[in-house]
Image (cartoon, rainbow, N blue to C red):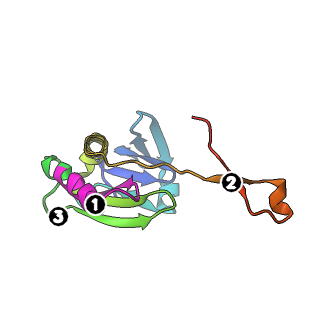
Amino acid sequence: PFRVGDQVKAQSFQGRVRAIGIFQTMIVTPDNLTVFIPNGELINESIVNYSLQGTRRADLVFGIGYDDSIDQAREVILRIISKEPGIQAEPAPVVILKNLGESSVDLEARFWVVPDDHFSVSNKIREAVKKAFDASGISFPFPQRDVHLISQDHVRGDKSTVPVTPPA
């Protein structure tokens, strides 16, 4: 299911296959660790081969505020993607509404790259989107809670509440 040079995930290890021996396979991880996995264990486990298909889809999620424009954010993301030479033209990149979350509207950018470029291109896109969102006034929200303290009078029937503002 893999050859020397392929990027794989076997057991809990992810990396590039450097050697396939009679008894074990050597994988070098992205942080330059050398892992030897017995071939008997490889036969009995699932293996993910990131190289075999020749392209790999990147899925990047960007949360924006509920007050921000989905269309504007989508346009910014697609403009950045269109300028990145490492992204494949076909299938065409898309930005979908992935989720209406508790604190954010989540957009997911999906685009295709060659497996060796997955990490570097994804990182470039994340950084460029952050900078472009900052310049465009599109927010990156974070989880927030409104806390209201109920006074003792409320327990006795008084319906007043006291809003609490967290310290800055």
The percent position of residue 72, horizontal first and vertical second, equals: 24, 57
Inspect this view and state whether residue 72 appears: yes
Q: In the image, which disc is placed on residue 127? A: none
For residue 40, side relative to residue 78 (left or right)? right
The percent position of residue 138, horizontal first and vertical second, equals: 32, 49
Quote the CA–CA distance across marks 2 and 1: 40 Å
Q: Please tell me whether residue 76 is drawn above or below residue 130 in the rendered image.
A: below
For residue 9, side relative to residue 111 (left or right)? right
Q: Nearer the viewer, residue 136 or 62?
A: 136
Q: Quadrant of residue 51?
A: bottom left
Q: In the image, which disc is placed on residue 148? A: 2
The percent position of residue 126, horizontal first and vertical second, equals: 31, 45
Amino acid type, mark 3: Ala
Please give the name of the residue rendered at 39% of the width and 38% of the height, measured from the top-left corner.
Answer: 30
> First in sequence: mark 2 or mark 1?
1
The percent position of residue 90, horizontal first and vertical second, equals: 14, 63
Please give the name of the residue rendered at 39% of the width and 60% of the height, measured from the top-left corner.
Answer: 106
Q: In the image, which disc is placed on residue 110? A: 1
Quadrant showing the N terminus:
bottom left
Quote the CA–CA distance across marks 3 and 2: 48 Å
> First in sequence: mark 3 or mark 2?
3
Q: Secondary structure at mark 3?
A: loop
Quote the CA–CA distance across marks 3 and 1: 9 Å
Amino acid type, mark 2: His
Q: Nearer the viewer, mark 3 or mark 2?
A: 2
Amino acid type, mark 1: Arg
Residue linked to disc 3: 92
Please give the name of the residue rendered at 79% of the width and 53% of the height, measured from the top-left corner.
Answer: 151
Q: Nearer the viewer, residue 76 or 82?
A: 76
Q: Nearer the viewer, mark 2 or mark 1?
A: 2
